[in-house]
Each structure stands twice: as C-alpha cells, then as structure tokens.
Image (cartoon, rainbow, N blue to C red):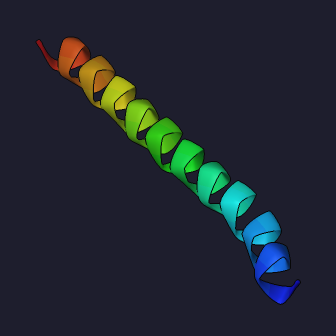
Amino acid sequence: MKRLLMWAVGVPFLVISMVMVSFSDGLSTQVASLSWAQRH
C-alpha cells in the first residue's frame, strides 16, 4: 500500500518536473535566439 502511495505521488511529480525542465529549456532557447537576433 505504501509503495502504491509512493507511485501515486512520485509519478505525477516526475512528469511535472520533466515538463517544467523542458518548458524552461525551450524558453531559454527562445530568449537566446531572440537576443541573438537583436544583436545581429
């Protein structure tokens, strides 16, 4: 039962953290390309 609870909490947390990482990564890439376009 405890393991099931751990899975129920851990899996969504892992998914959310992965989404946040990919989102922030894409955001920083967008910002970098934007600043690069402004410089050139």
**37 or 11, which is in the foreground?**
11
Which quadrant holds residue 4? bottom right
Give the quarter of the figure containing the C terminus: top left
Which quadrant holds residue 33? top left
**32 or 12, which is in the foreground?**
12
Q: Position of residue 31 (x, y in %)?
A: 37, 29
Labels in figure, total: 0
24 with respect to 10 (left or right): left
Q: Is residue 36 above or below residue 6?
A: above
1 with respect to 35 (left or right): right
Q: Residue at x 32, y 19 (%)?
A: 34
Toward the front, the furthest residue is 1
Q: Residue at x 84, y 87 (%)?
A: 2
Q: Residue at x 61, y 60 (%)?
A: 14
Give the quarter of the figure containing the N terminus: bottom right
Toward the left, the furthest residue is 40
35 with respect to 1 (left or right): left
Q: Position of residue 22 (x, y in %)?
A: 45, 40
38 with respect to 25 (left or right): left
Q: Position of residue 20 (x, y in %)?
A: 57, 47
Q: Position of residue 7 (x, y in %)?
A: 73, 70
Q: Is residue 40 above or below residue 5?
A: above
Which quadrant holds residue 10? bottom right
Toward the bottom, the furthest residue is 2
